[in-house]
Image (cartoon, rainbow, N blue to C red):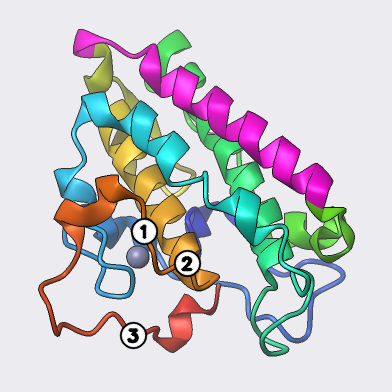
Amino acid sequence: MADLQDDRTAGGAQADTNVQPDTKDWTWTLQRRCLQCGFDARLAEAQTISGRTVELTAPWQEVLRRPDVARRPSPAVWSPLEYGCHVRDVCRVFEGRVRLMLDVDEPRFPDWDQDETALAERYGEQEPSTVAGELAESARQASAAFGRVGGDQWGRKGLRSNGSQFTVLTLGQYFLHDLAHHLIDVGVDELPQAWAPALPPHGESRGRGPDAAR
Ligand SMILES: [Zn+2]
């Protein structure tokens, strides 16, 4: 899935012919629960975002030790290694955005094209153990950034390149959903405890749609 789809620019020069760029706007996840992963971002309270960042990234240490970590389940779906690289970079981007929102009044976020980044950084060829260490560190930094937010700062605003507006709180909620969703993308079904209140009722589909490929 995309977390920042509207930040992308059209078509990389070296397009991956297998993986369709995710062009959907995922900001709806701030208005209702995601039925693909069960996470309801609206329920994430400000004070929990820092801790949940750690919880929702911890499973990657095990994921990145899988023997087949670099294998794509199908040509059009990122491998767990590629997803791991992406989550590492998502943490870096969101940490930067939080700091920017605290330092500057209503900043416009720098563009970040996640599909171009995946190609340019050769996600699929990175060393899994290195990625695991980098992901743990970037998650720690993002957690710390949200942990430093206090009081009125949660209401500070920032703008994406398409003009859609976030507060520090909604950015954090959006971020947590992204982390949760990517665990489902790589088949982590035993979800961190903190997720439990957001799970769908028993029997409700949590199946992956085609748009969950990313
Ligand atoms: Zn989701």
The relative height of residue 88 versus residue 109 in the rendered view (above or below) is: below
The percent coordinates of residue 90 (x first, y second) are: 57, 44
Whether pointer 3 and pointer 1 mark residues with C-beta atoms closer than 8 Å, the reply is no
Whether pointer 2 and pointer 3 mark residues with C-beta atoms closer than 8 Å, the reply is no
Q: Nearer the viewer, mark 3 or mark 1?
A: 1
The percent coordinates of residue 62 (x first, y second) are: 62, 55
Left or right: 172 as drawn, with respect to 84: left
Q: Which residue is mark 1?
A: 191
Front residue of 179/159: it is 179
**Residue 207, disc:** 3
Numbered range of the magenta stretch: 129-152
- Identified at 73% across, 89% down, the residue is 75
The Cα atoms of the two marked residues, 2 and 1, are separated by 7 Å
| Quarter assignment of residue 115 | bottom right
Any part of residue 9 in sight = no
Task: State the SS at label 1.
Answer: loop
Which quarter of the rendered picture does the C terminus lie within?
bottom right
On whether residue 123 falls in the magenta region, the answer is: no
- The mark nearer the N terminus, 3 or 1, is 1
Q: Quadrant of ligand 1?
A: bottom left
The relative height of residue 191 versus residue 176 in the rendered view (above or below) is: below
The percent coordinates of residue 182 (x first, y second) are: 49, 62
- Identified at 62% across, 74% down, the residue is 21
**Residue 188, disc:** 2
What's the amino acid at mark 2? Val
Whether pointer 2 and pointer 1 mark residues with C-beta atoms closer than 8 Å, the reply is yes
Left or right: 118 as drawn, with respect to 60: right
